[in-house]
Amino acid sequence: MTREPIERVRIQLDGAAVDVASVGSLAAALLNAGVASFRQSVRGEARGPLCGMGICMECRVVVDGVLRRACVEPLRDGMVVETR
Amino acid sequence: MKADAIVIGAGIVGAACADALSREGLSVRVLESAFAGGGTTSRAMGHLVVMDDSEAQFTLTRRSREMWTDWAPELPASCEDQQGGTLWVAADDEELRAVAPKVEFYRARGVQAELLDARALAEAEPNLRPGLAGGMRVPEDRILYPPAAAKWLLERAGARGATLEERCEVTAVEPSRVQTRDGWTDTGFVIVAGGFTSARLLPGLRIEPRKGHLVISDRAPGFARHQLVELGYLTSAHGTHDGSALTRESVAFNLQPRATGQMLLGSSREFVDFDDSINSRLRDRMIRRALEYMPALAGLAAIRTWIGFRPCTPDNLPLIGAWGEAPGLFVATGHEGLGITTAPGTGELIADLVLGRRGALDPLPYAPHRAMDGHS
């Protein structure tokens, strides 16, 4: 039995093309790609997914110019993602 | 050792009472059922605003804002104190006609206020929609972060020897003594500053919880410069609890730029007892009201919504003074949506009353046993 290869999609992450595994939400893909900080707090501290279910708003990133919660954002080929 | 005074409640009002009493040299214990600044204080906007809806409200808000302004240089950065001013927005000519007398009212009493025409309003706040009639700017109004301000007042009182006991619920009060899980404790003066919970300790106290929603946005520095309040706010705030649909529930445009760059949006008012769930219908109505004034708000992401309960009295003035005939029992609550503003004047007045002297404020309009319209 052969395992199906994990599909990969290409996103624009902070201005660079990055191939990420298509493993579900944008947050999962970013974590899988090694992104540690999704945004910065007022005092410049790193922030990232906490609740993972769209409640805490900690993982918000800008997707195609609009603020989104990465944990409930579907992954799409060609999406433009900005962490802050 | 017996404390000179026990303050019940470590919200902003209890903290200000502890601060004022300790400044007079009294030994003070503050008993808080949960934790300091964690109740209504933590739900508030922290708009320090001089209000003109009655002479008594004006006097108390002006005196208190003066005190906050005097203290401003001492406030730590955590209090996020800033003097941004208030801009009262007139939507149409009818509202604008009411502005000139308001400006006169403030100026005649020594408070800076300016009338803005439509152009000056647009220049002051470019994100307001075109076509608004004008407004009034009160440049010396301020903004701060209420829980940090309460903590600072308690720390200042603490430096004079006052103590704070958290998770210490008071279950009953009498003149000069309070009951906790450890039994009765004697003191000189009891000051009940328990906000909307005060009626549990003082049956007959006419306080009702008046729920409000706040929504905060992601950071958008510079989106607004002043605290922006529609002139219709007074109608929203002062609809009384007479059972009519109009006044049991209301919203008004009230936007505050926080020091973090976030926009804090209010306001709603409703009487729903202690239902602390988010009323999404009323929250959405509140947001729609704001969008009528500032359509560009639609481009900001709302990241949190919360509710709080204002301690509301039938005549919208706080209850500050002796409770009952016997000496040794005082109340300081019922500040509705103005407790952060009016805490300093309240503390000062309580200290004057406890010491039996006449101070800056005439206590009569705030006397807890005054006759109040709407509840008889």
Image (cartoon, coloured by chain):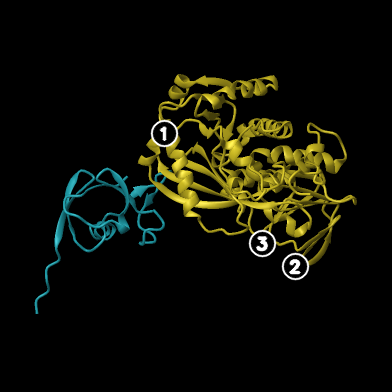
Chain colours: A cyan, B yellow
Chain that bears disc 1 = B
Please rate how many residues cluster around mark 1, counting C-alpha atoms within 10 Å: few if below 14, some from 14 to 19, many from 20.
some
Mark whose residue sits in front, 3 or 1: 1
As rendered, which of A68 and B167 lies closer to the eye?
A68
Question: For numbered disc 2, what is the local secondary structure?
Answer: loop
Residue B37: horizontal and vertical position, in percent? Answer: 62, 51
Residue B175: numbered disc: none
Quadrant, the N terminus of chain B:
bottom right
Do labels 3 and 1 touch, CB within 8 Å?
A: no
Amino acid carrying label 1: it is: Phe
- At label 2, the amino acid type is Arg
Q: Mark 3, residues whose alpha carbon is within 10 Å: few (<14), some, or many (≥20)?
A: few
Residue B167 circle label: 3
Q: Is residue B85 visible?
A: no
Residue B194 place in picture, x, y as percent: 71, 53
Query: Between tags 2 and 1, which lies in front?
Result: 1
Q: Is residue B60 above or below residue B34?
A: above
Q: Amino acid at mark 3?
A: Arg
In the rendered image, which residue does mark 1 sit on? B223
Left or right of residue B328, residue B200 in this image: left
Which residue is found at the position 59% from the left and 25% from the top?
B98
Is residue B245 in view? yes
Q: Tell me the distance, in whole angstroms, between the alpha carbons under discs 2 and 1.
A: 50 Å
The answer to which of B267 and B335 lies nearer the viewer is B267
